Image (cartoon, helix red, strand yellow):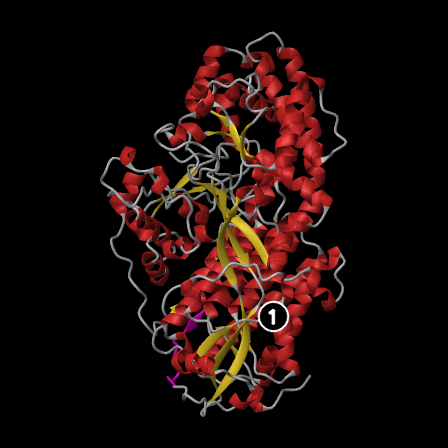
């Protein structure tokens, strides 16, 4: 059964696996949520298709216009209809047939790459995309407008919208909710003293006291939990990784733990409380990050009766106060639009069972009926378990039933995302080790030889990229026992997702916008796009934009844990990367963003104006890309759009940081494009970091009005590396590493389209 988080009708959609659309309508926050989860493994295996068909070359690309309800906004698909028909061309070894080659200082290695692939990527020193394009205009160098640069601009707008929502709406609401829930927890504790529910009630005081004080240091901690809360803060401040939680293990003597009981006690990864992403930019955002991280991660486990009691008390508190529930929903629901629904059991689920078991308007004294509590727990265990494990737990030898260990209630559960779900199914314990087969007993697999950390390439591979899978195969990643089988299941699942699922929220919509980057470009596309090097360059673009997405949503998206002026002269006319479907989907995503924010009254005029401009620009680039693919001439106005592209990017950048005192591009060092996000955790002590660095240059030989022209554009430099978990990187630390040239090396597959 898929869990019904709103108590409303479940609408089954039959695809290769079952996709469930959870339709919700509660209170003033009524809207539709599409919740996509995996069917049981055996069901997926039954319905998996053995092969994924490649698109035929030069096939007509078409996206039907359709309005898809997301509850917050309708996704209006931008139609792309074009049959690529660019005449093939070759680049002479001395670049003799490239009209403007003399304007560039080109090394022999660069010439060789341009001759072979008609493009090459090389190191750049610019810290933002707009700098490179402005420089092109000043130096009369034809610009190559990349998908990277526009995807980056959307990241700036997304991050700004989320940041303003948090500062202006979420922080005040969270303070209000903290105060109310802490007061209720104290009241319940006084009433339940001397009963079997006393410890559970005390745990809730500690739970809300920590969450409250993390947000507001002036909060007074109740005497009853001062010791436990002080210990929690010491652990949070030390952020040294996995430790026993004093609050969640309320009533336990943690100074004298029997080793036999250690696996049963609640452990928390305190390194997660290091503020990252845009949350390092003010004290208020740092505090908000910690408080919401606490509420998103702490799990009242169903396997522990006392923790279930705590969760029931929290549910009853919200159910008995319309004001408190409304405040909770104001915090929960907007993030559904940005990121998605909770992966865990939350209030919506428990409130339904509470009503079924205890009746309407259950009072505190009603909850202590042990028979009803047993019934409540049994019904709760029938709910779907989380798809993503975000808890540090032991491997299968010590905790064989992972669902039992991680299934529980979260006050503000972190969100289910498709990429994290891909990761979950491609690490231990799902894929085993390299010494056994998938048919062997999992109990024989060696955790020490397991795949404890995924790779970013797992995501595009699961989305259907044969090149990403080929790279992973070459790295030995596919040698793990069940990796190939699980990857096939993921590819079948993802391949059958409907557009309504892909466009259910901004997170999914962003990934949907990246999907056209995957796969080879066939006959009819420009020569520079018809080679393996370009496929890999597009993988780099995918991963660069995906890194920005993970950075922007680092607080909310659940993280995977393995077990332990006039027109220039003709020669300077530029070119747009002919990926019209990427630009088209970006148009649709921007529209959806505007309408969704406006529906929630969280769209200031400045952001609306910014998004309007971005939408218009993306639409223009889509049109230009379509013309290029059919060799239709561009208008003077369209060439002007390319020429002044840097100015548009500069305005997007300035708008993104205006509220942080950024007023001029001379302040670029304060807000460069470089950023970092940890995306997966190995409880053994490391995290997988994904980073974006300086803007790299891409040189591309393109056909312009019957002549070959060398153009220059900007692309992501994208890094993937392991780092100690107790030192999860902030943007500031990562930028310092870049300044000191301490960044890791690129992967070998990335070097295939680069020159030094």
Vertical arrangement, residue 283 with respect to residue 658, above or below: above
Observer-nearest of 582 and 751: 751
Magenta stretch? 75-89
**Is residue 321 in view from this perspective?**
no
| Residue depicted at x 41% and y 89% | 92
Q: Main secondary structure of the magenta part?
A: loop
| Residue depicted at x 57% and y 39% | 271
Instruction: Give residue 68's position: percent from left, percent from top.
Output: 48, 54
Residue at the outermost top position: 194
Residue 86: within the magenta?
yes
Residue at the outermost left position: 439
Observer-nearest of 647 and 632: 647
Q: Quadrant of the N terminus?
A: top left
Observer-nearest of 383 and 278: 278
Instruction: Give residue 427's position: percent from left, percent from top.
Output: 38, 44
The residue that label 1 is drawn on is 125
| Residue depicted at x 62% and y 59% | 156
10 Å neighbourhood of mark 1: few (<14), some, or many (≥20)?
few
**Is residue 671 in view from this perspective?**
yes
Vertical arrangement, residue 73 with respect to residue 750, above or below: above
Secondary element type, mark 1: loop
Q: Is residue 660 left or right of residue 612?
A: right
Instruction: Give residue 575's position: percent from left, percent from top.
Output: 52, 79
């Amino acid at each position: 059964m898929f869990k019904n988080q709103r108590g409303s009708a479940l609408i089954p959609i039959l695809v290769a696996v079952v996709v469930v659309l959870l339709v919700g309508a509660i209170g003033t926050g009524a809207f539709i949520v599409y919740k996509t989860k995996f069917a049981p493994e055996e069901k997926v295996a039954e319905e998996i298709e053995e092969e994924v068909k490649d698109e035929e070359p030069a096939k007509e690309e078409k996206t039907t216009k359709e309005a898809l309800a997301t509850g917050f906004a309708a996704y209006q698909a931008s139609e792309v209809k074009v049959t690529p028909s660019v005449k093939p061309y070759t680049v002479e070894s001395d670049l003799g047939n490239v009209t403007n080659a003399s304007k560039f200082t080109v090394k022999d290695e660069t010439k060789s790459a341009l001759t072979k692939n008609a493009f090459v990527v090389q190191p750049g020193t610019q810290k933002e995309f707009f700098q490179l394009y402005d420089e092109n205009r000043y130096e009369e160098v034809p610009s190559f407008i990349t998908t990277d640069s526009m995807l980056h601009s959307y990241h700036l707008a997304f991050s700004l919208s989320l940041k303003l929502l948090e500062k202006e709406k979420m922080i005040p609401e969270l303070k209000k909710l903290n105060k109310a829930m802490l007061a209720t927890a104290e009241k319940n504790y006084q009433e339940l003293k001397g009963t079997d529910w006393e410890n559970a009630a005390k745990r809730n005081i500690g739970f809300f006291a920590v969450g409250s004080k993390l947000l507001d240091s002036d909060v007074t901690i109740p005497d009853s939990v001062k010791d436990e809360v002080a210990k929690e803060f010491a652990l949070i401040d030390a952020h040294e990784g996995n430790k026993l939680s004093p609050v969640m293990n309320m009533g336990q003597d943690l100074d004298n733990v029997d080793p036999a009981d250690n696996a049963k006690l609640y452990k928390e990864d305190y390194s997660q409380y290091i503020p990252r992403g845009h949350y390092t930019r003010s004290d208020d955002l740092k505090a908000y990050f910690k408080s919401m991280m606490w509420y998103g991660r702490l799990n009242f486990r169903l396997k522990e009766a006392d923790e279930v009691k705590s969760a029931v008390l929290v549910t009853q508190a919200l159910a008995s106060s319309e004001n408190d529930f409304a405040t909770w929903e104001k915090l929960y629901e907007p993030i559904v639009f940005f990121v998605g629904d909770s992966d865990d059991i939350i209030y919506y689920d428990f409130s339904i069972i509470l009503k079924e078991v205890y009746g309407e308007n259950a009072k505190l004294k009603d909850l202590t009926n042990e028979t009803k509590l047993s019934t409540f727990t049994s019904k709760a265990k029938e709910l779907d378990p989380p798809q993503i494990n975000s808890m540090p737990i032991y491997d299968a030898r010590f905790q064989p039933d992972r669902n039992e260990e991680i299934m529980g209630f979260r006050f503000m559960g972190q969100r289910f995302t498709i990429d994290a779900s891909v990761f979950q199914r491609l690490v231990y314990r799902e894929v085993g080790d390299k010494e056994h087969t998938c048919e062997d007993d999992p109990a024989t697999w060696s955790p020490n030889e397991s795949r404890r950390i995924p790779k970013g390439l797992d995501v595009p591979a699961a989305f259907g990229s044969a090149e990403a899978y080929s790279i992973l195969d070459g790295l030995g990643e596919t040698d793990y026992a069940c990796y190939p089988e699980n990857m096939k299941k993921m590819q079948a699942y993802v391949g059958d997702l409907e557009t309504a699922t892909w466009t259910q929220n901004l997170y999914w919509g962003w990934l949907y916008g990246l999907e056209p980057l995957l796969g080879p470009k066939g006959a009819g596309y420009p020569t520079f796009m018809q080679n393996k090097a370009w496929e890999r360059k597009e993988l780099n673009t995918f991963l660069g934009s995906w890194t920005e997405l993970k950075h922007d949503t680092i607080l909310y998206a659940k993280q995977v844990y393995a077990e332990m002026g006039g027109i220039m002269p003709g020669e300077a006319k530029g070119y747009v990367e002919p990926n019209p479907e990427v630009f088209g989907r970006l148009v649709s995503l921007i529209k959806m963003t505007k309408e969704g924010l406006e529906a929630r009254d969280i769209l200031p005029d400045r952001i609306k104006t910014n998004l309007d401009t971005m939408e218009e620009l993306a639409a223009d680039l889509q049109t230009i890309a379509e013309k290029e693919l059919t060799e239709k001439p561009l208008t003077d106005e369209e060439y002007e759009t390319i020429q002044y592209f840097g100015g548009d990017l500069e305005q997007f950048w300035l708008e993104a940081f205006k509220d942080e005192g950024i007023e001029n591009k001379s302040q670029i060092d304060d807000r460069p494009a470089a950023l970092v996000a940890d995306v997966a955790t190995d409880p053994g002590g490391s995290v997988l970091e994904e980073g974006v660095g300086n803007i790299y240059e891409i040189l591309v030989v393109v056909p312009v009005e019957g002549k070959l022209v060398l153009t220059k554009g900007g692309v992501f430099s994208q890094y993937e590396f392991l780092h100690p978990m107790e030192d999860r990187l902030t943007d500031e630390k990562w930028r310092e590493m870049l300044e000191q040239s301490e960044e890791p090396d690129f992967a070998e597959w990335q070097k295939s389209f680069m020159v030094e």
